[in-house]
Amino acid sequence: MKDKLKGMIIGMSVGVMLSGSIAFADSAQIDVVMKKLKFMFDGKEIAQPDDQQSIVYDGTTYVPIRFLSEALGKDVNWDPENETIWIGKYDKAVVATYKSGTVTWGELSRYVSVISFLDPSNKPRESTSNYKENLLRQMISYRVLSDRATDDIKNEVTPIVDEHLKQIKEYFASQSTVDFAGQLKDAGLQEDDLKQYITGAITAQKVLELKATDERLQSLYDYSIKFQKGEYTMASVRHILIGFTDSDGKARSKDDALKRAQEVEDKLKNGADFAKLAGEYSDDPGSKQNGGLYENAPVNNWVAPFRQAALTLELNQVSDPVETDYGYHVMRVELRKNMPFEEVKDELKAQTVSSEYNSFMGGELNEIIQNITMPK
């Protein structure tokens, strides 16, 4: 009889914990002692409500879960399907509602874990709510954009995803003695979680690429050539660097560097061989053994003063010393040309996709998302 009664009190206590009211079993009140106890949380007393008193039965004290959850600032949820009480973060709790669907805490948690799995440097950021909310918005954006994919895009994406997944597996296999499945398990993930993320990201990109038409990309290219000087310019430039630190790592004053650069300039203007002088004078290890030559290089890769000189100097003329943070450069531009459209087309497409995505995130997505409620 005692064991039977004990089973009844366990069932009753769950009801009290969730509802905060006195429980009854089979319409017969169980003889228990209701007590209003003192609770201290981190040294601070929190009063127990009259309708959520504790129960003392058979030497055991039962405390209402809802009271504890509220005192700790944690949500409490009952999952009848799995007969589980959740305090705090609840996998099935809806954290976002948007026009065509919802995102649960469990779905977001797996998404966050995938990002950290692929790039462990993100792991410390998981503790910040803003980071998770940003990933939540990204997750919704990928879903919404993927829903707009045509059958052709879906068919195109499938082999790309398979190849990405293959490369990821090979990479992780090379980094650990634990097999890929084991590494996923350690991260609380399954391969399908990873595949869903890759599929969403690539599909969203392909949808946005529909706006990167050849006509639009050509227009962007023409605009850059006309109004953004140097954006797609390549040049072959010889230079001799007289550094503020010499080749042996010894500091050199500005005055001494300038004097030495002017000496080089005078020799070049008097017909000295550029390549020979570069080998003798230059402090630039990247070019001195190549006659001081940077051949067919994008000028945008260079620091501003060097870049400006490369864009404006007359061809095959020796420059005055050009000062940068590295020292003084004596330069000669031997070739300057615009990169062909076909060579920069992929770069223009990537820029367009990025611009469209940022526009979508800052505009349309805000109208699509109806509610975001991050758990405490």
Image (tube, rainbow, N blue to C red):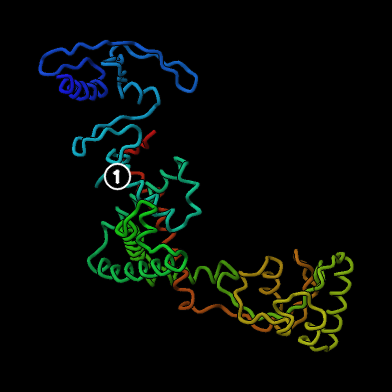
| Residue drawn where x is 74% and y is 75% of the image | 284
| Residue drawn where x is 25% and y is 24% of the image | 18
Q: Which quadrant is the C terminus positioned in?
A: top left
Residue 259: x percent and y percent?
89, 72
Residue 20 in sight from this viewpoint: yes
Question: Left or right of 63: which side holds 151?
Answer: left
Q: Is residue 166 above or below residue 3?
A: below
Location of residue 20 by image quarter = top left
Of the pair 39 and 212, the residue shown nearer to us = 39
Of the pair 164 and 325, the residue shown nearer to us = 164
Residue 265: x percent and y percent?
83, 79
Location of residue 211 by image quarter = bottom left
Q: Which residue is mark 1?
A: 103
Residue 52 in sight from this viewpoint: no
Residue 165: x percent and y percent?
35, 66
Label 1, secondary structure: give it: strand
